[in-house]
Image (tube, rainbow, N blue to C red):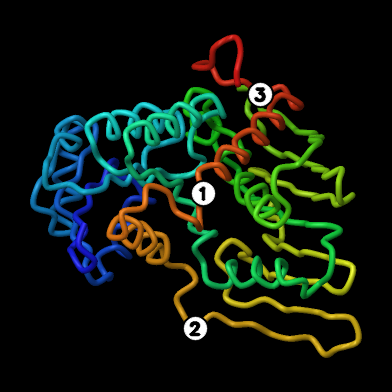
Amino acid sequence: MEANRTVRWGILATGGIAERFTTDLLTLDGAEVVAVASRTEASAKTFADRFGIPRAYGEWDRLFADEDVDVVYVATPHHAHREAAGRALEAGRAVLCEKALTLNAREAQELVTLSRDRGLFLMEAMWMYCNPLIRRIAELVRDGAIGEVRTVQADFGLAGPFAADHRLRDPATGGGALLDLGVYPVSFAQLILGEPDSVQAHALLSPEGVDLNTGMLLGWSDSGASALLSCSLVADTPLTASVTGSLGRIDVPRGFFFPERFTLHRNGREPEEFESRNDPHSFRHEAAEVMRCLRAGETESPLVPLDGSLAVMRTLDAVRDRIGVRYPQEAATRA
């Protein structure tokens, strides 16, 4: 793809996250949304009319077959990610797939293998990794600004309550706090420390069998570092994060996954404040990274590497194993 060519997007699903992404996407130079698909043509048409999208499909495969679509943004619930992203890749389309990438590591590996075998772009929509301040935090840690990392702490909890028939409490849609919210603290910790060697977890489960409140303790044997993480559908947690090292600490205030600022504390020095000059709440950063990769002919993003997404899914699987959560679509065994 030429360096300055317009990237033509197809949007799959028409819920709230698709609306937010499309709103931000349309503010990017060189981005065009040419088609949208949903389970019903009426829903797709309403979405298309709202955003001025020329084509609306009531069938997924019509979107995947649209030769004008360069990349498909998959915004379905988790349980449909494997099917939707897989069918898009099989049709020859690049894919940006919402987090968590799939229900489990086995499904994620299938998508990664498919994309690599076909030489097609695939990226998990972990917008946090594309946020300029999160990238700056990772850079400071890599450069030794706080010495050797000792601990990471992060939480993401909502007060709820969510009714029993809500998507977040439905095992069939991958409900529970972990895949919707816990993926952020886990991804933050693994951005800093990589995949853990040990995983411990405790949870409050709903009558339906999904996690309502989960605490996680991850460990790294080589460094002795640990991460204390939590997610909740029944508690309004601080939504903060911190990384503590042998020479200092980085504190990220409420909304750590789209921070407006953070503070670097270095032993013996005054605290340093870092602030965002770009919209931290925007999906523009991840969309721009997808477009950069496509124009450069890259099939994976260095900011959101597929091996990193696989590692996060393995950790989420391990957490679910510890707390006893299994989704009805899953086979008797998992990767």
Crowding near the residue tagged with mark 3, few <14, some 14–19, many ≥20 C-alpha atoms within 10 Å:
many
Horizontally, is 2 left or right of 106 in the view? left
- The residue positioned 84% from the left and 50% from the top of the image is 226
Residue 200 point in image, percent of width and height: 82, 35
Residue 168 point in image, percent of width and height: 53, 36
SS at mark 2? loop
SS at mark 1? loop
Residue hosting label 3? 325
The quarter of the image holding the C terminus is top right
The quarter of the image holding the N terminus is bottom left
Measured along the vertical axis of the image, is residue 317 above or below residue 300? above
SS at mark 3? loop
- The residue positioned 53% from the left and 16% from the top of the image is 330
Crowding near the residue tagged with mark 2, few <14, some 14–19, many ≥20 C-alpha atoms within 10 Å:
few
Residue 134 point in image, percent of width and height: 59, 67
Residue sitting farthest toward the bottom: 270
Give the label on residue 141, or none. Answer: none
Q: Estimate the spatial distance between the alpha carbons at disc 2 and disc 1, rounded to whole Å.
A: 25 Å
Q: Of the residues under marks 1 and 3, which one precedes in the sequence? A: 1
Q: Of the residues under marks 2 and 1, which one precedes in the sequence? A: 2
Give the label on residue 277, or none. Answer: 2
Q: Amino acid at mark 1?
A: Pro
Q: Estimate the spatial distance between the alpha carbons at disc 2 and disc 3, rounded to whole Å.
A: 41 Å
Mark 3 and mark 1 in contact (Cβ < 8 Å)? no
Residue hosting label 1? 305
Which dot, 2 or 3, sits closer to the camera? 2
